Amino acid sequence: MAVALPLALVTAACSAEEPAASPPHTVVESLAPPTPTPPPDPMAGFYAQTLAWGECAPFATGEDSRAAFRVPGLECARLSVPLDYAKPDAEKISIGVLRHRAAGERIGSLVVNPGGPGGSGMVAAAGLSVPAAKGEVGKRFDLVGFDPRGVGASEPRIRCLTDAERDADRADDSETDGSPEGVTKQENEARDFGVKCAERTEHGNAMLANLGTRDVAKDLDLLRAALGDQKLSYLGYSYGTQIGYTYAEAFPDKVRAMVLDGAVDPEQDQLEGNLAQLTGFGKAFGEFAKWCAEQSDCALGRDPAGATKAFQDLTRPLIEKPVPAGDRKLSYEDLGTAAIQAMYSDQLWKQLNAGLNELAQGRGDKLIALADQYNERGADGTYGAIQDAFTAISCVDNPKITDKARIAELVARANEAAPFLDDGKPDGAALDTCAFWPVPNTSEPHPPKVDGVPPVLVISTTKDPATPYEAGVNLARAMKGGLLTFEGTQHTVFLQGVPCVDDAGTDYLISTLPPPPTRCPAP
């Protein structure tokens, strides 16, 4: 009403003989609604943050990280991220970050993840910093590792089982009991595990629900910005390849270069992935048997064809009668874990053979040490969080599988693929922990949609025991990237002293040229 009155007065003042004048332009503009101010971007503060670098010692969470963080020249910091990206104004959590600065003309940062899921990127980057510093990667890139949310130095950390509960779980061989009662016991324990994770992890179900690779990829983009990089250069091993292609799918315009080594097949669900992995372990055991047969002290005899039966004969008695191992006992479950750990690299075959010879004498010290290595158990009896994190992340990354007929089929096929791990007992079809997980999954297997992403380099090893060669072939095809084939028996290879692989990967990272298909023989 206050605006209408002056307009009416202006009109009335016009004489009848003269046409009415139009209101001044400025008055008309004053009636237009103001342009609304856009709401503040709740993510702006996260993207604008800077990292306060300092000493790494306070970030150590166990023996491995304490030792790794003693490398000269390391810096550590914390990155703030939303607990729930749908509610960025609500709870915040932090990500542990480690950096080793480039020694020469810097291109940018190379962010590293070692896989798992649940592995510490901070420890991995610290370990790589020494060999990388001797080559062009360390000269041209800041080597950066981060502990994914819930892992290692990131806070809060996933907590499910106590150290004592983990020891007890490893000593319990109830998984060999396929009777209805045994299956019920296994499923009750699987359900209880998820309950404990929710109860013992800060923020409970909210943390579990926002723990998956979907959210890690978003954290990675905040890290890219905090490092001052316009685009991301990334090195992912094993499960770290899944973080890589998930990031590429979410932020295709932010990718500079990616080396993905030891690929997780993006289209396989948990059952298919488990079977592929066990198939790889079975093949690696065949290679171990050939190597062992050439040793004068081979615990499995001099005939590789008889190695599986010899292994079974030596190890199956542990189901009923564990053997002493220091102040503990070596269980059948621990024996299987030790064998799997040794399949990851032929560098561990000598230790496995020595452990099997010791087992023949009624002791399990060497084998339980291998199992401890896999489980991240320190000499003081404390555990890292990798096993808790592995389960929690896997469960939220995949749909629940409750088809017992399909589970039974997998068990049968797994026994055929890796017969050295067959316990010889009737098998049940127990649902696993993920079937009872207290929150829904946030991802599922699918071919990555990466239009607009520059060519990536996928490295795949012909006899990789954990991520079979074909998974790398499939990922390179899905991402329209280059494939580098390494002819060897180990899990991942880049920056591990194989000149052909290291040179090809380094040239790609520095030049980001489309990588051609290449083969590298074992040295």
Image: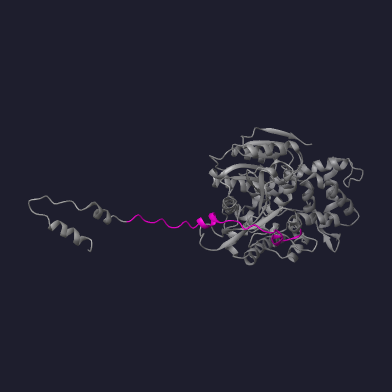
Residue 488 position in % (x across, y down)? 76, 39
Q: Which of 354 and 279 is in front in this view?
A: 354
Magenta span: chief secondary structure:
loop
* Residue at image location 82% in from the left, 43% down from the top: 288
The quarter of the picture where the N terminus appears is bottom left
Q: Quick check: 122 left or right of 422?
A: left
The quarter of the picture where the C terminus appears is top right
Q: Which residue lies furthest to the left in this view?
A: 17
Q: How many labels does the image show?
A: 0
* Residue at image location 69% in from the left, 54% down from the top: 122
Residue 366 position in % (x across, y down)? 85, 55
Q: Quick check: 207 left or right of 139?
A: left
Q: Is residue 134 above or below residue 402?
A: above
Q: Which colouring convention does the figure follow? A: one colour
Residue 291 position in % (x across, y down)? 85, 41
Q: Nearer the viewer, residue 54 or 205?
A: 54
Q: In this view, does 317 lie above or below 495?
A: below
Q: Is residue 42 visible?
A: yes
Residue 59 position in % (x across, y down)? 69, 60
Q: Is residue 188 magenta?
A: no
Magenta extent:
34-63
Q: Can residue 261 be seen in this view?
A: no
Q: Which of 291 and 496 is in front in this view?
A: 496
Q: Does the magenta stretch include residue 62?
A: yes
